[in-house]
Image (tube, helix red, strand yellow):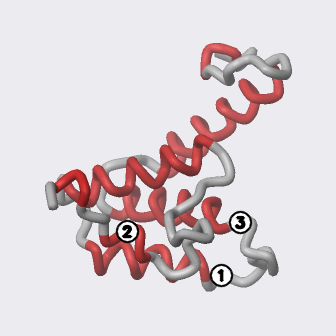
Amino acid sequence: MSLCEMPSQLSHSPDLPKSPEGDPVFPEPWAAEAFAMTVHLHEKGVFSWSEWAAALSTALHRPGRAEDGSDYFDCWVEALSDLLVSRGVGDASAILDLQKSWQRAAEATPHGKPIELGNDPLR
């Protein structure tokens, strides 16, 4: 089995939505990108598997979660953001500003067109 064919430990995360065949599924492209970014940062040594598992577990066990688990990847992004801030890789206010900019870009993008950060009317 080549390195590319070996499943990542991240694919065994508890509560990760899976297809009937057991493969990870993503509700939106951004969730797949968050997953890939997490795998990449883990493989580059930004954080260990146990650190990631602890951060994700913390986010998944916060009060107010959606009962149907539909906010799983929101928790994923929250955990990744928290981890990057705690490692000094990211800045909490910069992450929040970027999140708001993407939201404005999404709201300003015509239906069916790709959402691009350049669509943020405040940029």
How far across and down, in percent of the image, does residue 121 sit? 75, 15
In-image side of 116 versus 68 (left or right): left
Q: Which amino acid type is shown beneath numbered disc 3?
A: Asp
Does dot 1 land on a helix, a strand or a loop? loop
Secondary structure beneath dot 3 equals loop
Between tags 2 and 3, which lies in front? 2
Give the amino acid type for the residue marked by disc 1 in the picture: Arg
Which image quadrant is residue 43 in?
bottom left
The residue identified by callout 2 is 10
**Circles 2 and 3 in contact, beta carbons < 8 Å:** no
Q: Nearer the viewer, residue 46 or 122?
A: 46
Residue 71: mark: 3
Which residue is nearer to you in this view: 113 or 57? 113
Where is residue 88 shown, x and y percent of the image?
31, 54
Which one is closest to the eye, mark 1 or mark 3? 3
Closer to the observer: label 1 or label 2? 2
Identify which residue is drawn at 68% across, 37% down.
Answer: 100
Q: Residues within 10 Å of mark 3 (few under 14, many from 20)?
A: few
Does 42 sit above or below residue 62?
above
Q: Is residue 37 above or below residue 52?
A: above
Lower position in the chain sequence, tag 1 or tag 2:
2
Query: Could one spot residue 17 in this view of the protein?
Result: no
Alpha-carbon span between mark 1 and mark 3 = 11 Å
Q: CA distance from mark 2 to mark 3?
A: 18 Å
Residue at figure coordinates x 66%, y 32% from the top left: 102
